[in-house]
Amino acid sequence: MGLFSFLTQELAIDLGTANTIILYNDKIMVDQPSIVAIDQSTGKMIAIGETARAMHGKTHENIKTIRPLRDGVIADFNAAEQMIRGMISMINIKNLVFTPSLRMVIGIPSGSTEVEIRAVRDSSEHAGGRDVYLIYEPMAAALGIGLDVLAPEGNMVVDIGGGTTEIAVIALGGIVCNKSIRNAGDGFTSDIQAYMRHQHNVKIGERTAEDIKIKVGSALPDLENPPADLIVRGPNLMTALPIEVPVSYQEIAYCLDKSLSKIESAIFNVLELTPPELYADIVEKGIYLAGGGALLRGLDKRLTEKINIPFRVVEDPLHAVARGTSIALKNVGKFPFLMR
């Protein structure tokens, strides 16, 4: 450790469409919704994370809530910069007389364009990052799961986040073949909103749809331990009168079927591109499921039945990418796949 190394603080960041997670010294210091509230008259951020999420859908004309990322990439540069800066400021780094320089490793979708990559790098640097490294999310997820990504053997990871589903075969420190599709947790939420509108004639917001997904969400219409029906309240689209609707997990399995079929097709596409020797490794070890979408009831069983390869939900799937970025941060000189 150099004489002035204490002047540099190292942060691992999972900059997600739904949530942003920041690790410092291998500890999760920030785990907040990726949303900010902006004062329209000044352009300044007035709330961030959970506080801003509580305002979402309830604001007046002077306040606007913004989700800076869409489909896994930055959609609003200014809001993203303010969000990153604000979340970094949540970390209480003690015993510092002055502001340290920041070294960051940030996860990005594997299908990011050069423009999208530049947007992440620029917004991070504007938020205070001096040394900014980028890592593709499926590689970060593999590290976070505990896989030896440098080994001469194949591992397949499916990371279902908020904005994208990342599918990759990894071997020898590189991504052999991959696919990134913009069909993931946020898409599931939109599916539920549309279903409630068309099937039950009730209008619900994003937060209510998210609640339905968590409480009765399912990938299968037949579960061994099914959740109880959820009572959903909202305005009738025809009369605007309040109504109550019971929603079952079978209904949600039906309404998510098309989106899940798209993920299955993408997995098949990647398997078709996989070299035979690596394919054999994957069949033997199974396919690893990470990300918030991995928590959807029955998803591992559905995918196993459809693809005929075992799917395994990893431990703590929500934080796999974040843990992986933290591991990468400590091995900047070792891992050739980090982008600077």
Image (cartoon, helix red, strand yellow):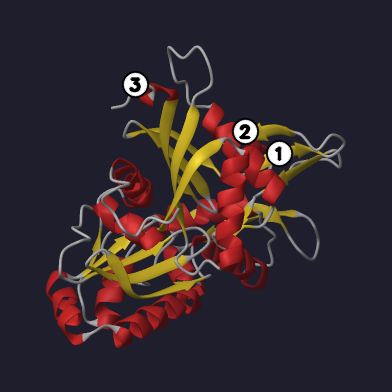
For label 1, the residue is 37
Hey, what amino acid is under mark 1?
A: Ala
- Where is residue 238 drawn, in percent x and y? 79, 66
Residue 20 vertical placement versus 203 (above, below): above
Q: Considering depth in this image, is 262 or 82 the residue closer to the camera? A: 82
Label whose residue precedes the other's in the sequence (3 or 1): 3
Left or right: residue 70 compared with residue 11: right
Between the C-alphas of marks 2 and 3, the distance is 40 Å
- Marks 3 and 1, Cα distance to the nearest angstrom? 40 Å
Which is in the foreground here, disc 2 or disc 3? 3
The kind of secondary structure element at disc 2 is helix
Which of marks 2 and 1 precedes in the sequence? Answer: 1
Identify the residue under disc 2.
51
- Return the x and y of residue 20 as percentages of the image width and height: 50, 44
Q: Position of residue 136 (x, y in %)?
A: 41, 60
Q: Is residue 57 visible?
A: no
Q: Are marks 1 and 2 in contact (CB under 8 Å)?
A: yes
Which of the 4 image quadrants contains residue 63? top right
Judging from the image, what secondary structure is the residue with disc 1 in? strand
Residue at image point 37% right, 71% down: 167
* Element marked by disc 3: loop
Q: How packed is label 2: few (under 14 Cα within 10 Å), some, or many (20 or more)? A: some
Q: Residues within 10 Å of mark 3 (few under 14, many from 20)?
A: few
Residue located farthest toward the front when viewing the structure as drawn: 3
Residue under numbered circle 3: 3
Determine whether label 3 and label 1 are within 8 Å by CB: no
Look at label 3 and name its amino acid.
Leu
